[in-house]
Image (spheres, helix red, strand yellow):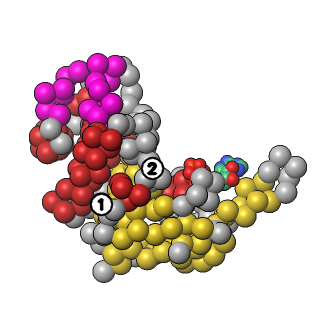
Amino acid sequence: MSILKLSNIHKSYADGNNRLNAVLKGLNLEVEEGDFISVKGPSGSGKTTLLSILGTLLPPDEGQYLLNGEDLTSTNADLYKIRNKLIGFVFQDHRLLPQYSALENILLPVLAYQSSVPQSFIDYAHYLMEMTQIEHVANQLPESLSGGESSRVAVCRALIMKPSVLLADEPTGQLDMENAQNIVSLLSEVNKVLNTTVIMVTHSDDMAKAAKRIVTLKNGILQ
Ligand SMILES: Nc1ncnc2c1ncn2[C@@H]1O[C@H](COP(=O)(O)OP(=O)(O)OP(=O)(O)O)[C@@H](O)[C@H]1O
């Protein structure tokens, strides 16, 4: 079953002289539930733009985006709610909040809707920390975590709401080879064990190979 479908997506940005620079030019993408896709492409080809549209952080100028059968390009879509419930994000720079422990960072998305965290989410956070082997740093602040541990906290935080789709923008970009491979293996495991659909942008051919399918963004479309 297809979990998301982009049809004829166009996106342009205005440059400094108010001329439009077309980045996505009629892009199509259909992703099956439980798939793991790597998106490659030259620098500036629009990979982050594509991920931002998939994450509903950026509206396309033209085209249709269906997620779980819902048309997110319709004006009625409640994008904030959809983003929080259906989409998990992992960024290259982790974006952990420095004043909160690893466990509290993981639980932050839960607090978008309620003032306290139900026990079921705390239990699930511990399950995710065990799965990602960071249980021992649960009460530590981000400043005391290694790069690999911070990445794993970021993956747990992206998974806490049990999203249908996990979007990862260069998740291994700041890591050494060994930690980078660990994170990609972890994304594979998440994909297999939790059946979360994963879409990962990467520059690395080695990392891209972990995915079930590799697509390349070039000249504004996927090839
Ligand atoms: N907010 C913006 N305003 C104007 N131009 C932008 C904006 N965001 C991106 N661009 C331009 O759009 C093009 C695509 O950018 P994008 O970041 O999506 O590419 P990318 O493939 O992710 O690049 P990289 O691999 O270098 O991170 C680039 O030419 C970039 O300069």
Which quadrant holds the N terminus?
bottom left
18 inside magenta stretch: no
In the image shown, does 199 or 217 lie closer to the viewer?
217
Q: Is residue 190 visible?
A: no
Q: Is residue 192 visible?
A: yes
| Disc 1 secondary structure class | loop
Q: Position of residue 212 (x, y in %)?
A: 31, 69
Q: Residues within 10 Å of mark 1 (few under 14, many from 20)?
A: some
Could you say which disc has been placed on residue 13 in the image? none
Magenta stretch, main secondary structure class: helix
* Residue at 26% across, 29% down: 102
User: Which of the 4 image quadrants contains residue 92?
Assistant: top left
Q: Are marks 2 and 1 in contact (CB under 8 Å)?
A: no
| Disc 2 secondary structure class | strand
* Residue at 22% across, 36% down: 117
Q: Position of residue 142 (x, y in %)?
A: 32, 24
Boundaries of the magenta span: 134-151
User: Which of the 4 image quadrants contains residue 166?
Assistant: bottom left
Q: Nearer the viewer, mark 2 or mark 1?
A: 1
Which amino acid is tagged 2? Asp
Could you say which disc has been placed on residue 210 in the image? 1
Q: Is mark 2 within 8 Å of ligand 1?
A: yes
Q: Which residue is mark 2?
A: 169
* Residue at 53% across, 75% down: 223
Q: Position of residue 214 (x, y in %)?
A: 41, 68
